[in-house]
Image: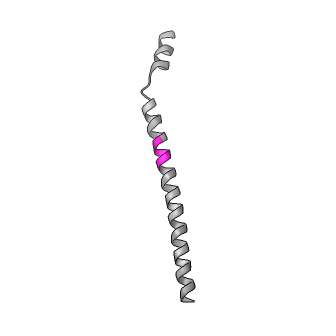
Amino acid sequence: MKAFLKNFVADQSGASAAEYALILAVVVAGIALAAGNLGTAVETKIQAAADEVN
């Protein structure tokens, strides 16, 4: 049992999956932020165009 616990604690094969998940979370957050900013910019330009038409 001690050998199993020692090997389990020393095993780092799951670390790469956790790192990939963290990188993916950062990328998704960046995309969400960019999409929000782009949406706001498009909305502003469309509203400005609508104001000119009126």
Main SS class of the magenta portion in the image? helix
Front residue of this view, candidates 11 and 23: 23
Query: At 55% from the left edge and 79% from the top edge, which residue is drawn?
Result: 48
Question: Depth check: 4 or 29 in front?
Answer: 29
Q: Position of residue 42 (x, y in %)?
A: 51, 71
Furthest toward the top, the residue is 2
Q: Is residue 16 left or right of residue 2?
A: left
Residue at position x 49%, y 58% in the image: 34
Q: Using residue 12 as the reference point, say whether residue 50 is left or right of it.
A: right
Q: Residue at x 52, y 77 (%)?
A: 46
Look at the picture and state if 33 lies above or below 15: below
| Rendered view: 23 above or below 50 | above
* Quadrant, the C terminus: bottom right
Q: Is residue 19 magenta?
A: no
**What's the image's color scheme?**
one colour
Residue occupying image coordinates x 44% and y 21% = 11
Q: How many marks?
A: 0
Question: Height in image: 27 above or below 39?
Answer: above
Region of the chain picked out in magenta, as a range: 23-27
Q: Where is residue 5 shown, x and y percent of the image?
A: 51, 15
Q: Residue 51 in the image: x percent, y percent?
A: 57, 84
